[in-house]
Image (tube, grey):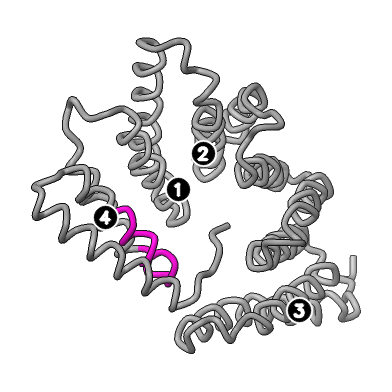
Amino acid sequence: STPLYSSAASDVYKRQSQKMQQQASQMNSNRGSMAAYQCLSNAYIGSQRWDKGIEVLEAAYQLLTPTENPVVRISVLSQLVSVVKEKKDNKKLLKYLQELENTLHNHISANPSLKAGFADVYLFNELFYSYYYLNTHQPQQAYEHLVKSKEYLDENTYFMYKVLYFDTFAKYYQAIGAYQQASDYIDTTLTMLKKDFTSDYAEQLLEKARIWKQAGQSGKAIPLYEQALAIKDSTATVLSNNQMAQIQSKYNIEKTELDLSLIHISEPTRRTPI
């Protein structure tokens, strides 16, 4: 889940990226322009403008040269993978994942002593392959990448990648209809996020609600929706009115669907005469 950002933070990113772009142009620096595009993408994504975020990231991608520093290429490709995954653009997701995998393989083959330092990138790559296969309804292939991803998980793993690891397992179990296991994995992410990541915590509550909705247990799902919406309401002051309206509308629609399904399942079942 992608955290929600304030308009103010988004504006800071934009101003910073504009300065970076201006400096890069003056210095005729490809790398500076790429960094500016990456910064601008953060601004767009922070204000929920995903298409614009992808557009400027792809502009950064176009600036990559065949002899580009592998770390720069990995940075741009990782960001593209993250964003197109959120948009469920599976064709682009596979394309960028394969490029990321090849770049990583070539870089580490040439510099084997660096492999341990790239454990997070290997983990990221395996987890997002899992997302790809889950998006394309191939849970067995997703599970194989999940098993492989565990090789790269340790106490030094970037915190949010640890959260992603458990989130991906939740999505896998949801995909195969093992709803209690899926819910348990979401609970792990909730424990991890509760203290310092309020917006992500609310997003995971919504994920848990969707699991129980899919399981046909609206009675479990509705309180989770209400809890998540209460958190969203409490953070509304840092969001623009337009952003909040979009978010509120999305979640209210889902909750209304659940309310209706709960009414439906609570009605007495009419037996058909044999």
Dot 1: element: helix
As rendered, which of 186 and 133 lies closer to the eye? 186
* Amino acid on which disc 3 is placed: Glu
Separation of residues labelled 2 and 1 (CA atoms): 8 Å
* First of labels 4, 2 by sequence position: 4
In the image, which residues are magenta?
36-50
Q: Is residue 214 left or right of residue 84?
A: right
Q: Would you name the residue on which mark 2 appears?
A: 128
Residues under labels 3 and 4: Cα distance? 37 Å
Q: Would you name the residue on which mark 1 appears?
A: 82
Q: Earlier in the sequence, mark 2 or mark 1?
A: 1
- Say which of marks 3 and 4 sits in front: 4
- Say which mark, if any, is on residue 242: none
Residue 194: % across, % down: 76, 61
The residue at which mark 4 appears reads as: 37
Q: Quadrant of residue 53?
A: bottom left
Instruction: Name the front one of labels 4 and 2.
Output: 4
Q: Residue at x 36, y 46 (%)?
A: 80
Q: Is residue 48 magenta?
A: yes
Residue positioned 58% across, 27% down in the render: 145
